[in-house]
Image (spheres, rainbow, N blue to C red):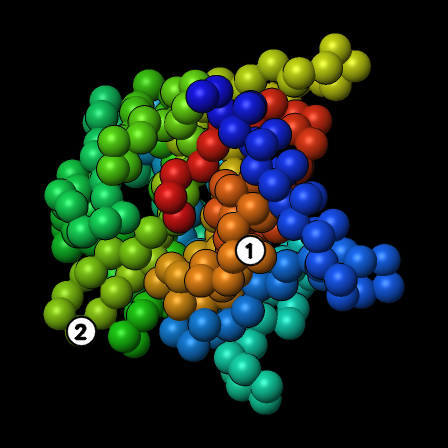
Amino acid sequence: MGIRLQRLLALAWALVACGSSGGGSRGYLALPQVAYQGGGLLTAPKIVNVTFSGDPLAPELQTFGESITASAWWNAIRTGYCEGSGGVCVGDGSSSMVELRTAAEVTYTDSAEGGPSTFQQWLASAVSSGQLPSPGPGAISNTVYVVYLPVTTTITIDGVASCSAEGFGGYHNIWQASSSQKVPYGVIAECAPLTPPFPNIATNTLLQDTTIDASHEILEAVTDPNPPTGYALDGTNPDNWGWIDVTGGGEAADMCVDHRSARQSRRRAPR
């Protein structure tokens, strides 16, 4: 079944479910709300953006990466994500850029299910060798490594390949850095932009698609660093299943996905 048909069926399911309820002034279920699941947030996030040698987008990504937590966008999207009523919230944080002197590998593998991961092996090596700064303290570190993979690199997570027709442009995951610490990270694949389904819609540039995916994953990494224990839809509630299907996930940024597919987009990986 094509991904477009899957989305349409999922959206139809969600609309039918909304119309079947007797609650509310017009007989519709309320829009789903992400809820805090009790597993912690990043209250002092440190976003470390990483590019590889030879990446033509590196200069623009450097400007983007260094300005993230100093932007009006950041102050708008992080507001309200707190550890329950009266609990600590996602804070101002900081952002920085690291441009590596080495080129990316042609392929990496990763897993959100505890399987083998050459990407996590690379990340561990880059930290231990000093190419990347060490994560800060804490059972879940406030450091988030956001790694941009050039168009010449493919990463496969649990059998799903980046930039493929049924693939993804980005995801976030968590790395077990030691027996006592987990470290969140995001992977952003610089995929060639897809042509929009309608002729009156302009095609995004590579930089636009890349920074859209990065913004999406950064928000989710700080509000749900160890999925799905932060802010996410309750996956045990059948009322949420249609929304999770149509958005490709149940986290904060997934709620902003274009349900009508005005822009052609790839299915995201399982985070």
- In x, y percent, where is residue 195? 61, 14
Q: Secondary structure at mark 1?
A: helix
Instruction: State the residue in front, 99 or 18.
Output: 18
Residue at the image point whose x is 39% and y is 73% from the top: 39
Q: Quadrant of residue 102?
A: top left
Residue 98 seen from this side: yes
Q: Residues within 10 Å of mark 1 (few under 14, many from 20)?
A: some
Please determine whether, in this image, residue 211 is positioned above or below residue 30: above
Instruction: Say which label, 1 or 2, has the lower sequence index.
Output: 2
Residue at 25%, 31% (x, y): give it. Answer: 159
Who's the residue at 15% across and 66% down the image? 178
Q: Amino acid at mark 1?
A: Asn
Which residue is denoted by mark 1 in the rendering? Answer: 240
The percent coordinates of residue 244 (x first, y second) are 52, 48
Q: In the structure shown, which secondary structural element does the residue marked by tag 2 occupy? A: loop
Question: On the picture, is 7 further left or further right than 57?
Answer: right
Q: Give whichever of 234, 150 is nearer the camera.
A: 234
Residue 70 vs residue 36, the one in the foreground: 36
Q: Residues within 10 Å of mark 2 (few under 14, many from 20)?
A: few
Could you tell me the amino acid type at mark 2?
Ser
**Disc 2 target residue:** 180
Residue at the image point whose x is 33% and y is 51% from the top: 173
In the picture, measured across the screen, residue 214 lies left or right of residue 182, that is right
Viewer-side label of 1, 2: 1
- Measuring from the top left, give residue 79's x and y in whole percent: 65, 68
The residue sitting at the top extreme is 199
Q: Is residue 46 left or right of residue 259?
A: left
* Residue 207 location (% of width, % of height): 56, 28
